[in-house]
Image (cartoon, rainbow, N blue to C red):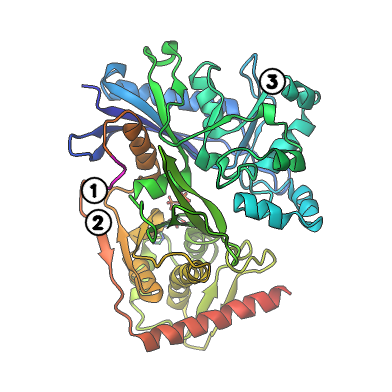
């Protein structure tokens, strides 16, 4: 039986392959996994690079191991790929070798270039077409930087001799032995070059950023046939039939398929993606307009907001303040207090993200009294996750997004039941955590399974019941706490000015 899907999850810190078995009822269960850590390169302050060759080697190695553990290539029906988004690769079409290290999404080296475009008044046209603000985060300025850095590559790009792409494009090129130069629409939506409505590259934007269209991959749907693996790699020409950027794959993994469904991944930072339905919504509160997924003739648009410090605030309690020795101790310490004692922590360690966008803000603690102790710091850090989530949900509402039904959560921090209950209370929403946590890989597997008709649709078929938290807090208490939080954010912003 060929009921296995090979999901590749190429993340910022590691490369993983997971084999999922599709049962007749449409549920996907993981049966084998392999993972290799990825080396991070920091050549200058603000610069972050990966070795695209190392990413390819690790992908091949983890896939081969999972194919073996899964019982051989004959049991596999297709490959699905999900990846760290925006990370940009330039490679030689003839040799298949990268021409420079990949520029990672966090890299700020093109801040001046995007700043120049913003100063020249280009942000409204870029946002109207792509949903994105002008920021070095997105791939276009990284592509242009790579072409400038590698002598002769601009001229070669025009002749089709060098290729540009994000990580899934690079991996598909390698997996197909150079036969396919494609991307999926969700990854393309993070470049600043794709029109969100037509899902085609915009020649005017390619011109604006200085990226030759000839070097860009073709844009495909998320469950399209993206190419066939070169038979010598795994012993058969396995089709690649699904791809999506990591946050979008997580949306699919959670089964957040309807307008008003949203997911937030609480890891080191936190990423909210809210499904807004079949038409794009332009944000007036500096959320990002993006694609949820595009499958056949179904397109789901999304709004996205990020919190820079989520789990990292817990890491700071552990490694900086040293008031806990393990992350999980935070739950008991916070629950041991009857309330927060008026203490708030704004975890602006690396500035504040949406909707505040204060890059100069720093971490701020307010409300200390002589009774404040380590437990108050812990509680304030955990509570800050919920307040920041509320700020994002308020921004969504302001943008006219459909009312949220359920907030689906995943990521390391969701092990903390105190924090999850507090999110439900402060955000006035039911919080659901699936029993299986690998939503990103699951999303990629679902897309590929749909692509080869192993499953009929992307609906959720959880193998086990999710954990659920419903709001219990009264409105007066919530208002009082939110007032305290807003005062703390004001203090953080004033201190930064
Ligand atoms: P990433 O994918 O960004 O590396 P993970 O999803 O693995 O992140 O989550 C790791 C984060 O979760 C760490 O910052 C850690 O401090 C936090 N974390 C793990 N367990 C708990 C817990 N029980 N309570 C609070 N935070 C936790």
Which residues are the magenta region? 457-461
Mark 2 crowdedness (10 Å alpha carbons): few <14, some 14-19, many ≥20: some
Front residue (pair 251, 16): 251
Whichever of labels 3 and 1 marks the residue nearer the N terminus, that label is 3
Q: Is residue 458 magenta?
A: yes
Circle 2 SS class: loop
How far apart are labels 1 and 2 at the CA level?
Answer: 8 Å
Residue 217: image x %, image y %? 59, 29
Q: Is residue 14 magenta?
A: no
Category of crowding for the residue at label 3, using alpha-carbon neighbours closer than 10 angstroms: few (below 14), some (14–19), many (at least 20): some
Q: Which residue was labeled with disc 2?
A: 466
* Left or right for 235, reference 138: left
Mark 1 lies on residue: 462
Return the mark for residue 160. 3
Q: Residue at x 44, y 85 (%)?
A: 479
Instruction: Evaluate whether residue 27 shows in this view.
Output: yes
**Label located before the other in sequence (3 or 2):** 3
């Amino acid at each position: 039986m060929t009921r296995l899907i090979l999901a590749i999850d190429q993340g910022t810190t590691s490369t993983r392959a997971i084999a999922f078995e599709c049962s007749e009822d449409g549920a996907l269960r993981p049966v084998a996994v392999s993972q290799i850590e990825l080396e991070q390169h920091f050549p200058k302050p603000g610069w972050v690079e990966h070795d695209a060759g190392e990413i390819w080697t690790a992908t091949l190695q983890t896939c081969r191991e999972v194919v073996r553990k899964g019982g051989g290539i004959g049991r596999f029906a297709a490959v699905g790929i999900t990846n760290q988004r925006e990370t940009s690769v330039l490679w030689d079409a003839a040799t298949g070798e990268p021409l420079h290290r990949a520029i990672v999404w966090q890299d700020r080296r093109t801040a001046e270039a995007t700043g120049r475009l913003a100063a020249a008044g280009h942000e409204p046209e870029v946002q109207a077409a792509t949903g994105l603000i002008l920021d070095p985060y997105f791939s276009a300025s990284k592509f242009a930087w790579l072409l400038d850095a590698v002598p002769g590559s601009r001229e070669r790009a025009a002749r089709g001799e060098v290729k540009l792409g994000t990580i899934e494009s690079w991996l598909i090129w390698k997996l197909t032995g150079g036969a396919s130069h494609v991307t999926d629409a969700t990854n393309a939506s993070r470049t600043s070059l794709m029109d969100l409505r037509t899902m085609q590259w915009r020649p005017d934007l390619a011109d604006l950023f200085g990226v030759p269209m000839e070097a860009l991959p073709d844009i495909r749907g998320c469950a399209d046939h993206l190419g066939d693996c070169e038979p010598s790699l795994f012993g058969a020409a396995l089709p690649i039939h699904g791809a999506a950027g990591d946050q979008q794959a997580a949306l699919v993994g959670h089964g957040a398929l309807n307008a008003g469904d949203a997911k937030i991944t609480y890891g080191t930072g936190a990423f909210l993606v809210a499904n807004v339905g079949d038409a794009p919504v332009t944000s007036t509160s500096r959320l990002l307009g993006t694609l949820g997924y595009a499958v056949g003739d179904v397109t789901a648009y999304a709004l996205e907001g990020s919190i820079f410090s989520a789990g990292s605030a817990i890491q700071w309690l552990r490694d900086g303040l040293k008031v806990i020795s393990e992350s999980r101790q935070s739950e008991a310490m916070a629950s041991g207090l009857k309330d927060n004692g008026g203490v708030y922590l704004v975890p602006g360690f690396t500035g504040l993200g949406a909707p505040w966008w204060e890059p100069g803000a720093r971490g701020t603690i307010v409300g200390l009294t002589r009774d404040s102790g380590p437990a108050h710091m812990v509680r304030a850090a955990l509570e800050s996750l919920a307040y920041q989530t509320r700020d994002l949900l308020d921004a969504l509402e302001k943008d006219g997004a459909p009312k949220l039904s359920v907030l689906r959560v995943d990521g390391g921090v969701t092990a903390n039941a105190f924090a999850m209950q507090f999110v439900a209370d402060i955000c006035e929403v039911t919080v659901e955590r699936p029993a299986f946590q690998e939503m990103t890989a699951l999303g990629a597997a679902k897309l590929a399974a749909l692509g080869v008709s192993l499953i009929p649709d992307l609906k959720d078929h959880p193998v086990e019941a999710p954990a659920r938290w419903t709001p219990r807090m009264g409105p007066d208490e919530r208002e009082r706490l939110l007032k305290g939080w807003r005062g703390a954010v004001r203090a953080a912003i004033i201190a930064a000015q």
